[in-house]
Each structure stands twice: as structure tokens, then as C-alpha cells.
Amino acid sequence: MKMDANRPIGVFDSGVGGLTVAHALKQVMPEERMIYFGDTAHLPYGEKSPEAILHYADKITRFLMDQDCKTVVIACNSASSVAYGPLRDWYGTEVDIVNVIDPVVEYYLEHLAPAKVGVIGTKATIRSGAYEKKIKEKSPEAGVISRATPLLVPMIEEGFIFDNISNAIIRAYLSDEPLRSVEALILGCTHYPIIKNQISKFYDFSVEILDSAAIVARTVKDLLGEKDLLRRSGDGQKDVFYVSDYTPYFEKISGMFFEEKINLKKLDLWKDE
Ligand code: DGL
């Protein structure tokens, strides 16, 4: 049976970070319809155990499959690093599941390896060693410096973005010596593209900063194209953005990415647990 190309793309993250990926998806595929889930009730994922993250990611993936999504994009590094394998094993025959780590690792290997690369991300992502393992597997001589930068997500979710507080925190993390002298930096958290310019500025714009948004959007487009699942035209149906809890900045930050006010709904998937 041929799958219907008009089905939506599901995207999820713990909060606003996945909007960086959602925005990039809309840039390369404006006619696609999207269902987004921001698990703001359980944010930050980066501080949770792998078991807890998998539990949340499983429920959201099943919800997006129930919404008839043709692809589920795990727009979160913390969830990609610990939940992608099990989710792919459980649901991979029913729906394509895309993580945000593999496409960035492939980009690095193709364009930059073995350049000394920094990886910054949440505690969960860095603890998993996902980037380092995947890079070293293909390029054992690559220099990989991984550092957890846990204050960045709450800082962004609280709206501290282009001010002295955010600059001071970014400086404090990146001034750490091995990180200071990298040749490339992977933003291993989908929240970080929101502060990409400040990070580039810290390095005097002389270090290539890899962010997952555009790279992952191209991967998803190629995948849908190969399967003849790209939508030919939009049908006027709006994208839907679900959050598991209202937070003051979700809507505000969404304004950085989408011109129109987003169709935001609260949905607690865990209320019966
Ligand atoms: N945006 C997420 C990531 O890429 C999650 C951040 C968090 O909730 O800690 O890791």
C-alpha cells in the first residue's frame, strides 16, 4: 500500500529547542504540515535519567504516530542520544524516525574530519558519549572535546538570550581551554542555535559552528523524496504546536521563528499515569 504524502511530519523536543529544527523543516519544505510537541512539563531532559527520557519520548512518539505522522523527527539531542535506538527498534517498521545526531556527525565526517571539534550539549547527551563514539568509529584520529553546558537550556527557556547574562554564561563555558581552541564546534543541543550568533562571536567568527537544524531538515527532505512522500502543495491546514505545560516564553520564542502566531495547544499526555 502506498503511503499518503499528505500526512504531517511529527517533531518533538522538551521545549523550544526543537523549533529551530521545525523552522528549518519549513524553510526547505514550506508545503509540509507539521505537528510539534514540546514536553515543557518535563523540561529539561538533559538533567533526567536515560530511562525517564525514553519514557517521555516513547509516549510522544506514539502520540505523533496516532496523529498519522509519516515521519517522526526527534528534534532533541538528549532524546536522540538515549531513546533513538529503542524507538527505532519498536516503531521503525511503522514510521521513519529521524534523530538529530547522525546527520551532523555525517556532515562533520564528510567536510571537516579529523579537525579538532568541540561538542557542547546537555548532561544527558554528553554523558551518553553519542557524538564522540559515532565520530571515532569512522575517524579514530579525530580530536573530540565534549563538554556539558547545562545552564544554557534554562537560560534560553527563561528568555535570557541576547543580554549580559547569556554572554557571561557562554563565555564562562567556552573559555575552558580545550574548548577555546577547537577548529569546529557542534551545537549538540537543539536549543543552542538560538544563541548561535553569540557563540560565533565568542570565537571571533573564525570557527565553523555546526547546528543540527538545517542539516537535519535536508536529511528529512531527502528521506521523504526517496520514498516519494514529499507533499506537492499545501492544503491550508495549519501546523499544530502542542505543549505539555504552558510556559511564558514558548509563544514568545516561537515568534522568532514563525511570522504568524502559532496554533498552540496544551496537552498533558501523562495525566492518566
Ligand atoms: N533541546 C534539547 C536537546 O537538544 C533538550 C534540552 C533539555 O531539555 O535539557 O538536548
Image (spheres, helix red, strand yellow):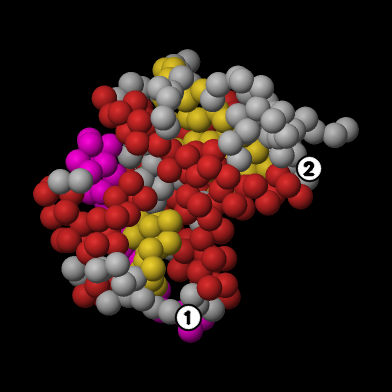
Query: Which residue, given by chain and number where applicable, does mark 1 sit on?
Result: 114
Position of residue 4 measured from the top left corner of the image (x, y, whole percent):
77, 30
The amino acid type, in three-letter code, at marker 2 is Asp
* Residue 184 makes an appearance in the image: yes
Q: Residue at x 50, y 52 (%)?
A: 214
69 w.r.t. 217: above or below? above
Position of residue 175 measured from the top left corner of the image (x, y, whole percent):
18, 68
Q: Which residue is most to the right?
A: 1
Is disc 1 placed on a helix, strand or loop? loop
Q: Nearer the viewer, mark 2 or mark 1?
A: 2
Q: Left of 132 or right of it: where is 152?
A: left
Q: Residues within 10 Å of mark 2 (few under 14, many from 20)?
A: few
The amino acid type, in three-letter code, at marker 1 is Pro
Residue range in magenta is 140-161
Query: Which residue, given by chain and number where applicable, does mark 2 sit on?
Result: 228
Q: Left of 214 or right of it: where is 3?
A: right
Is disc 2 placed on a helix, strand or loop? loop
From the viewer's side, name the closer residue of 223 and 80. Answer: 223
Q: Residues within 10 Å of mark 1 (few under 14, many from 20)?
A: some
Q: Which mark is residue 232?
A: none
Residue 147 appears in which quarter of the rendering? bottom left
Query: Is 77 inside the magenta-drawn segment?
Result: no
Q: Quadrant of the N terminus?
A: top right
